[in-house]
């Protein structure tokens, strides 16, 4: 389906590697291929991105399970949404401590201050009818999230001038400590406990938000779902996540994860639609044309050739789902099923027996028929 390398292979770990193993492998590879160490080396840059993506998946228990089950682009397709991997799920700070900030920031295009006080990313599962895979949709949801308090503009204080800079962190909201790991020293960064990461102490808290500067509010979010979308795709709504702790921070992102409802008869294989069509014995023998309503609004005509067999597949090109980001469409695959009559009335029984010379089993030639069937099946 895709030429992507296996994530385990990328990190050089086994399929049952522990979280610690994966983290260790990532750290060493990320350092090796880092752009600063390999200036103007596009191969290294590619490797570096590949390593990050593999780590983003394998370090998340949920994503790892999905990947183990479905592989690349399997059910749910890219967990990073239609835009592909953006590098958003990795906290470099967690991994490397503050010392690596500058290096990674340029890569993710965010400034030091910005990322440090970014609000939470949110994920919202959004159920849509199957028809959306055909047409796409303009949708709107109401999301409850921590948002900036309007009374105090996020300052948390009744009177904005009545705020003291936190002495514990000198207003940075974060404290750093140096840790020794064997021959290495590394700086670990965490929220300042005195001010709870806000960088300031509020003397006279705002009543609306209890001095937090933000509180849970619901907000309407409008978004566009592209045609060809499938379950598990995440749409990224930049800035629609939680408000940051600090006034000058930026809000997190909202990810809308599409959960597609089932179609009454189609199964889906990427842009192809699969269905079973039960037809009677005589339609299979004599051939027939069947028309059914279809998701593109036009009737779907299925031509059954005379002499068809149960299990035969008819491909109708160009009537499946649109490929994402293109006007091309997949196929409808129709598998013929023999629709056997159930309980017969007396009259029907009579009619069938009168036709047993053509409908029944020719006992005389049974062995030859078994051989014929076997060679057909094996071809
Ligand atoms: Zn502080
Ligand atoms: Zn407030």
Image: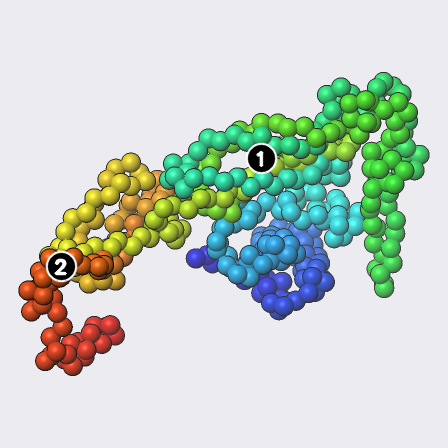
Instruction: Find residue 132 and report its horizontal and vertical position in percent.
Output: 41, 38
Q: How is the image coloured?
A: rainbow
Contact between labelled residues 1 and 2, with CB atoms less than 8 Å apart: no
Furthest residue to the front? 346
**Which quarter of the rendered picture does the C terminus lie within?**
bottom left
Question: How crowded is the residue under tag 1: few (<14 C-alpha within 10 Å), some, or many (20+)?
Answer: some
Q: Count the labels in the image.
A: 2
Answer left or right for 242 relative to 296.
right
In the rendered image, which quarter is residue 198 located in? top right
**Which quarter of the rendered picture does the N terminus lie within?**
bottom left
Instruction: Find residue 208 and report its horizontal and vertical position in percent.
Output: 78, 23
In the rendered image, which quarter is residue 278 located in? bottom left
Report which residue position mark 2 lands on.
346
Location of residue 150 with respect to 74 vertically, above or below:
above
Residue at the spot 61% in from the left edge and 54% down from the top edge = 62
Judging depth in this view, the residue of 38 and 193 nearest the camera is 193
Q: CA distance from mark 2 to mark 1?
A: 66 Å
Describe the element under mark 1 as helix, strand or loop.
strand
Judging depth in this view, the residue of 272 and 277 nearest the camera is 277
Location of residue 36 with respect to 325 vertically, above or below:
below
Residue at the spot 62% in from the left edge and 62% down from the top edge = 11
Mark positioned earlier in the residue sequence (2 or 1): 1
Location of residue 212 with respect to 21 vertically, above or below:
above
Question: How crowded is the residue under tag 2: few (<14 C-alpha within 10 Å), some, or many (20+)?
Answer: few
Report which residue position mark 1 lands on.
237
Location of residue 286 with respect to 299 vertically, above or below:
below
Judging depth in this view, the residue of 12 and 275 nearest the camera is 275
Residue 111 visible in the displayed image: no
Instruction: Find residue 98 and report its horizontal and vertical position in percent.
Output: 80, 47
Residue at the spot 37% in from the left edge and 48% down from the top edge = 271
Instruction: Find residue 169 and report its horizontal and vertical position in percent.
Output: 89, 37
Residue at the spot 76% in from the left edge and 39% down from the top edge = 116
């Amino acid at each position: 389906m895709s030429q992507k390398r296996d994530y385990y292979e990328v990190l050089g770990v086994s399929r049952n590697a522990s979280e610690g193993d994966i983290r260790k492998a990532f750290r060493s590879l990320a350092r090796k291929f880092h752009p600063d160490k390999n200036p103007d080396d596009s191969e290294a840059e590619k490797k570096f991105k590949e390593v990050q993506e593999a780590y983003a998946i394998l370090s998340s228990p949920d994503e790892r399970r999905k990947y183990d089950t479905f592989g690349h682009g399997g059910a749910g397709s890219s967990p990073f949404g239609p835009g592909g991997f953006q590098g958003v799920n990795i906290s470099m700070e967690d991994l490397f401590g503050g010392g690596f900030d500058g290096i990674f920031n340029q890569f993710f295009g965010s400034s030091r201050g910005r990322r440090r006080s970014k609000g939470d990313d949110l994920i919202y599962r959004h159920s849509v009818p199957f028809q959306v895979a055909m047409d796409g949709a303009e949708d709107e949801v109401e999301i409850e999230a921590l948002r900036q308090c309007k009374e105090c503009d996020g300052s948390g204080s009744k009177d904005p001038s009545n705020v003291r800079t936190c002495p514990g962190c000198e207003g940075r909201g974060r404290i750093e400590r140096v840790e020794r790991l064997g021959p290495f020293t590394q700086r670990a960064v965490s929220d300042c406990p005195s001010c709870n990461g806000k960088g300031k102490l509020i003397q006279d808290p705002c009543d609306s938000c209890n001095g937090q500067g933000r509180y849970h509010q619901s907000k309407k979010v409008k978004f566009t779902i592209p045609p060809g979308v499938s379950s598990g795709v995440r749409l990224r709504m930049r800035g629609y996540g939680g408000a940051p702790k600090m006034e000058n921070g930026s809000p997190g992102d909202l990810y809308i994860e599409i959960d597609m409802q089932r179609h009454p008869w189609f199964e889906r294989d990427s842009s192809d639609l699969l269905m079973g069509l039960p037809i009677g014995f005589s339609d299979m023998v004599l051939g027939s044309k069947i028309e059914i309503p279809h998701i593109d609004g036009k009737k779907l005509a299925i031509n059954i050739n005379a002499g068809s067999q149960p299990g035969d597949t008819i491909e109708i090109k160009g009537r499946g789902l649109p490929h994402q980001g293109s006007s091309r469409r997949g196929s409808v695959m129709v598998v013929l099923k023999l629709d056997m009559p159930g309980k017969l009335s007396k009259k029907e029984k009579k009619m069938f027996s009168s036709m047993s010379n053509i409908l029944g089993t020719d006992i005389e030639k049974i062995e030859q028929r078994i051989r014929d069937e076997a060679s057909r099946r094996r071809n």
